[in-house]
Image (cartoon, grey):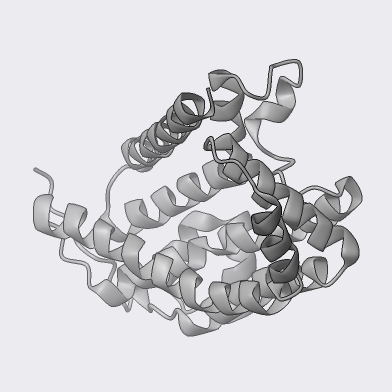
Amino acid sequence: MAETIAPDAGATAPKPLPARLFGVITSPRSTYAAVAARPRSLGVMAVVIAVVATGTVLLFSTEVGQRALLEQQVKTLQSFGMRVSDQMYQRMQESVGRAPYTAAIGQLVTLPLFAAIIAGIAIGVFNAIMGGDAKFKQVYAVVAHSGVIIAVQQLFVMPLNYVRESLSSPTNLGVFLPMLDENSFLARLLGSIDLFIIWWCVSLAIGLGVLYRRRTGPIATTLLIVYVVIGIVIAAIKSAVGS
């Protein structure tokens, strides 16, 4: 098994926060090399949270956004075979008024937590199983920087959602086959796979590959397979209970 060595802190020039933010998009390999050599995650995580939370607050503060949120909640429950009673619908109507605040608080908590979980899984796979020696701080910084793709997704999707008056992702694979029955397994599967999440998986794979000195291809393939399997499971559950 090839030895994996974390990047030497003296081998890569430091990058300021703006350069790292844009570098994740324009030159991910060199950017992740700089991140791995000098792991800093607070600034980029703050930017990602600010972009995602601001977009959500702005959308859910409008009547269009609240109506779209209520519709999505109802459709989600129905897709799992649940019947929405009048009482449930009324409670959901009341809750969407608080959505700008609850969503922002939720993202403030869940985004760093999700990054920590992903970093922990990566440490378990690459360090414990594959013999790598990267520190948690390095892995967490790589995962945090991959979150820039999620921020870009928010900037791209939120205006479209407002215009469409819908929270269904306009970048999922299902949009390429609009003729499919929305209750079919294939439509549900394609609807659960998003182009931006595919981009995020590839970006994260590049970061982990740079950090652990491993090829990007196998890492990206593994992440994408896991993502598709999760989509298959969700689509299968919805199809089973929905029928």
Q: Quadrant of residue 90?
A: bottom right
Residue shown at 74%/55% (left/top)? 70
Residue 16: percent from the left, percent from the top? 57, 81
Q: Picture quarter containing residue 112?
A: bottom left
Q: Is residue 22 left or right of residue 117?
A: right
Place of residue 113 in the rendered image (x, y in percent of width and height, measured from the top left): 40, 72
**Residue drawn at x 82%, y 57% as measured from the top left:** 67
Q: Is residue 106 visible?
A: yes
- x and y percent of residue 138 in the render? 32, 72
Quadrant that contains the N terminus: top left
- Residue 195, located in which quarter of the rendered image? top right
Regarding residue 16, the answer to whether it shows in the image is: no
Which residue occupies the foreground of this view, 167 or 227?
167
Number of labels in the image equals: 0
Left or right for 181, reference 29: right
In-front residue for pair 44/213: 44
- Residue 60 lies, with reference to residue 101, above or below; the image says above
| Percent coordinates x, y for residue 82 in the rendering | 55, 40
Vertical placement of 168 versus 179: above or below?
A: below
Q: Residue at x 13, y 46 (%)?
A: 2
Residue 10 drawn above or below residue 184:
below
- Closest to the observer: 186 or 239? 239
Q: Residue visible at 55% across and 74% down?
A: 106
Left or right for 94, reference 202:
right
